[in-house]
Image (tube, rainbow, N blue to C red):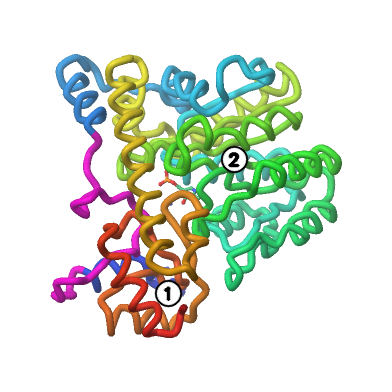
Amino acid sequence: VFDQLNSRPADSLLALIKAFQADDRPGKIDLGVGVYRDAMGRTPVMRAVKAAEQFLLETQDSKKYLGPEGDLQFVRLLEPIIFGNSPKFAQRLAGIQTPGGSGALRLGAELIQTANPSAKVLLGTPSWPNHKPIFASARLDVKEYAFVDLTSQQVTFESVVSALSSAREGDVVLLHCCCHNPTGIDFTMEQWREIADLLVAHRLVPFIDLAYQGLGDGLEQDAAPTRMILDAVEEALIAYSCDKNFGLYRERVGALYVVARNADDVRKAESNMAGLARVNWSMPPDHGAAIVKTILESPEMTAIWRTELEEMCRRINGNRAALAAASPELAFVSRQRGLFSNLSMRKETAVALRANHGIYMADSGRMNLAGMQPADAGAIVAALRAEGCL
Ligand code: PMP
């Protein structure tokens, strides 16, 4: 049977990790894989996470099953962080724990496929490379539109307006509501307001992907577009990941929320989300969500977590400022937010940056700003200049 399979292309970012490890030049810089790194180049377990794990080790007395919806206390404790206190749609909100933001996206895609199989998913490109395959594998039709011009590093807002205006009622619009991956280019609040108006006018359903809350300008600031959109629309989905802002990556921590029109629809959405979870992973993994719950139940641990997250955010924005200061052509990097910027370059240039300068970034030109130190800015700019990028 397996001879019937076609091989899939290898994941190029994983190949990049191996190539970086094999490079023994001392000045090599890893701007490849999308994880946070500290000033020592490590991706540490956060202090609050260590404290929560210690607490769990000492107090957890059972690992019995929780059920397809996971730990609903975890789901509830995240709500004020994402949605603020007492949002007007609080009574219309359903939530379920998922294996990471990826699980939330997949579950949300299947929920749409169940409710409205002919819905199209509008996806601004470039986007996280897993978005399209996740929706496509849930048998949804994905309609891509370019939302940004990488040469000028500007949003092409007319293409957004045109894509949303020509969508049909019930179509779904995937939105990165902070820290866009891979570009770091977020809409301005005015543009978000226009997007919210278009969603309402054309009766479209926003599917908000929040994977980096707190790594742009801070937890509250990063939530502003999400809250504004949810204030405007009747229905929405929100895929949330705790894997970056709690540094829990491999623990797979996330949640899917749905905003529905009324209590009846909330109940329908809840039972369908639980049913879909049951046939996908039966129940989500617990450990990471238990850590997040433990932190959020403790004011002391929450304070430690918030402080550490602010330090991470400051470090990323400090690196952005250092790159911008090293070259006026890179000024745009300091206006972008989150882990990434996506330079406009051909694959051969990314290969040359690795071979000639030991600077590792994705072939697409995406660089992880957390992978550098401020002192690396000069070397990065010199390499980009030598390879004709600036
Ligand atoms: N959405 C975006 C935009 C992402 O960048 C990622 C992770 N790289 C995810 C969702 C999925 O996150 P998780 O690791 O929690 O599945």
Q: Compared to 196, does 293 lie above or below? A: above
Q: In this view, does 353 lie to the left or right of 23?
A: right
Q: Which of 263 and 279 is in front in this view?
A: 263
Q: At x 31% / y 20%, what residue is drawn?
A: 294
Task: Report helix, strand or loop for mark 2.
Answer: helix
Quickly name the residue at label 1: 363
Query: What residue did someone put label 2 on?
Result: 108
Q: Who comes first in sequence, dot 2 or dot 1?
A: 2
Residue 11 visible in the displayed image:
no
Q: What stretch is highlighted in magenta?
A: 21-46
Residue type at mark 1 is: Asp
Residue 235: x and y, percent? 72, 32
Position of 183 with respect to 71 (left or right) is right
Q: Say which of 323 and 328 sits in front.
A: 328
Tell me which residue sits at (57%, 30%) in the image.
Answer: 257
Q: In this view, does 382 lie to the left or right of 333?
A: left
Residue 363 is situated, as x and y percent measured from the top left of the image, at: 42, 74
Q: Is residue 7 above or below residue 204?
A: below
Which residue appears at 28% of the width and 84% of the height? Answer: 356
Discs 2/1, front:
1
Judging depth in this view, the residue of 72 and 275 nearest the camera is: 72
Q: Where is residue 129 in the image (x, y as percent from the top left)?
A: 51, 61
Q: In which quarter of the image is residue 355?
A: bottom left
Query: Residue at image x 32%, y 30%?
Result: 307
